[in-house]
Amino acid sequence: MSLLPISREAVSAVMACVLCGPFAAQASDVHYVPTPMNVVNAILELGGVGAGDFLVDLGSGDGRISIQAAKRFGTRGFGVEIENHLVRKANEEAQKQGVADKIAFETRDLFNTDLGRASVVTAYLLPALNLRLRPQLFEQLRPGSRIVTHDFDFGDWVADARVTVNVPDKPYGPPRSEIMLWVVPADFSGTWNWRLPVDGREQAYEAVISQKFQKADGKGRIETGAAALGRMKISGDTISFVMGGEVAGKAAWREFRGRINGDTIAGTAVTIVENGNAAGDGVSVPWRAVRSQRSQMDIGEPQFGSGSSNKEQK
């Protein structure tokens, strides 16, 4: 769905009052405008939606995102919507398009929806609802799950990718739509320990990591000496970083790449500098780290509202 033909800022301000105030029950009267099909296709493409995905569309309107995914890729999933007549229309259209065996639509509050099966979540919600939804996404979605939104973001959780789609007949704001992608990151925060050979002798490594959303930094040690950490990247359950310092008076640097599984990381370590000399292509060795002390990824402050929680617009 979309919004009334006024600016995005005005829509956000008005709906924030409606959704959180005493007139929340009237929020469903906001005019429904279908999402253009070029935007629907851009959502599916940016999200990398495929046959193996399970897609959950929050505020599914007439069901066109889920129906198009099922038709193009064979994607399974469901949509939730507050308006009964739109749910009926979506299920009828799924039957008509021959994809009712893959997708279904329900009248349901999105905040009471179990997202655990989703590998992809799509949403066209106002900013206040996105912020309220954010903790639920981190709690229920697996690392690596993708979230794609239309026009409105998740505040200080920066999108991993975005595209702009021209929409000449858009009924509010500029004649274009912003489509944004987030990949749910694994929680890499805490203290990690492992051992690797350096200059022919096994050394103890430690990394203490702090993390906010998909961004992380930290400090490290190799044996008893301080080590630098840099170039940290987290995407879903995969991580990479470089770590190094002086060992026995000589520089030693490695690039680490691995996959997080609970309190372990398994992957490879590639030598960049050893014995103070550049290592060329580098030597790759297996690497396994264990989290000895847990911390907690920062996902911002929870947002609460007093109104009905499913007056989203599509």
Image (cartoon, rainbow, N blue to C red):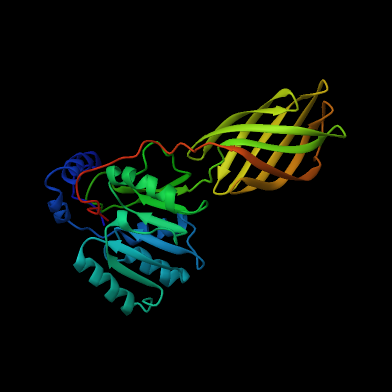
Give the left or right position of residue 227, taking residue 82 as reference.
right
> Is residue 196 positioned above or below 218 on the image?
below
Is 2 or 84 nearer to us in this picture? 84
Is 199 or 275 nearer to us in this picture? 199
Residue 295 position in % (x across, y down): 53, 36
Q: Is residue 93 visible?
A: yes
Residue that protrudes farthest toward the front in the picture: 292
Name the image quarter holding the C terminus.
bottom left
Residue 45 position in % (x across, y down): 46, 58
Q: Residue at x 78, y 29 (%)?
A: 252
Give the left or right position of residue 201, taking residue 129 as reference.
right
Q: Is residue 152 visible?
A: no
Give the left or right position of residue 146, taking residue 4 as reference.
right
Is 50 or 188 nearer to us in this picture? 188
> Is residue 306 positioned above or below 87 on the image?
above
In which quarter of the view is residue 96 placed? Answer: bottom left
Count of numbered circles in the view? 0
Residue 215 position in % (x across, y down): 52, 36
Residue that protrudes farthest toward the top in the picture: 249
Q: Residue at x 18, y 49 (%)?
A: 5
Name the image quarter holding the N terminus.
bottom left
Residue that protrudes farthest toward the right in the picture: 200
Residue 124 position in % (x across, y down): 31, 52
Give the left or right position of residue 259, taking residue 141 as reference.
right
Q: Residue at x 69, y 40 (%)?
A: 256
